[in-house]
Image (cartoon, rainbow, N blue to C red):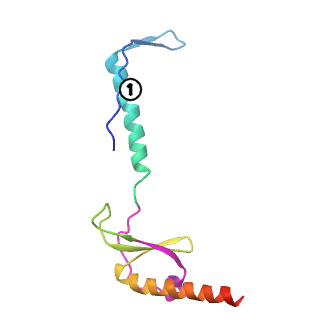
Amino acid sequence: MGGVLMAHIRVCVRVSDPTGFTAHLTDLQMDLIVFGILLSVTFSTVQGVTPKCCVKTSKKFPVETLMTVSKYEIQTSNGVCAIDALVLYAKDKRYCATPKLERLLQFLLKLKMRQSLKNATAA
């Protein structure tokens, strides 16, 4: 990420409330307020991109479930995630499978595509 942008304000800000209490904020206090705002924005931005990592994988899936997979992604352990996994997306659900299922999944996806092409040309 980029460096932190600090706004240096060279004024003494006078803040008062309805009771008549008046407070003067010095340059250092203003710097701390601006820094705090920037820090909170940075943390909220970083939290928004936290990846969903598989923490364990399954070796067995019903063929019916595998046939409903619309796409898959490969999760590697050399990134932010701790384990290698095959992330399957089927019917608005997310499954974590062992990477060894990738060949079977590729075969089933090709078979599914051929069947849909046959059905489209037959109609």
x and y, in percent, of residue 117 in the image: 61, 85
Q: Quadrant of the C terminus?
A: bottom right
Up/down of 92 relative to 15, above or below? below
CA neighbours of label 1 inside 10 A, class few (<14), some (14 to 19), many (20+)? few
Q: Count of labels shown?
A: 1
Q: Is residue 121 above or below residue 30?
A: below
In the picture provided, is 18 more to the left or to the right than 10? right
Against 94, residue 30 (above or below) is above
**Residue 54 lies in the magenta stretch:** yes
The image position of residue 44, as x and y in percent, is: 42, 44
Label 1 amino acid? Ile
* Residue 2 sits inside the magenta stretch: no
- Res. 114 image quadrant: bottom right
Residue 122 locus on image (x, y percent)? 69, 90
Q: Position of residue 93 (x, y in %)?
A: 52, 71
The relative height of residue 20 versus residue 101 in the rendered view (above or below) is above
**Residue underneath mark 1:** 33
Report the residue at 35% width, 79% height from top: 99
Q: Residue furthest right?
A: 123
Q: Residue at x 35, y 30 (%)?
A: 35
Residue in view at x 44 percent, y 50 percent: 48
Furthest residue toward front: 121
Q: Which residues are magenta?
A: 52-73
Figure quadrant of residue 91? bottom right
Q: Secondary structure at mark 1?
A: helix
Most distant residue in the left direction: 78
**In the rendered image, which quarter contains the N terminus?**
top left
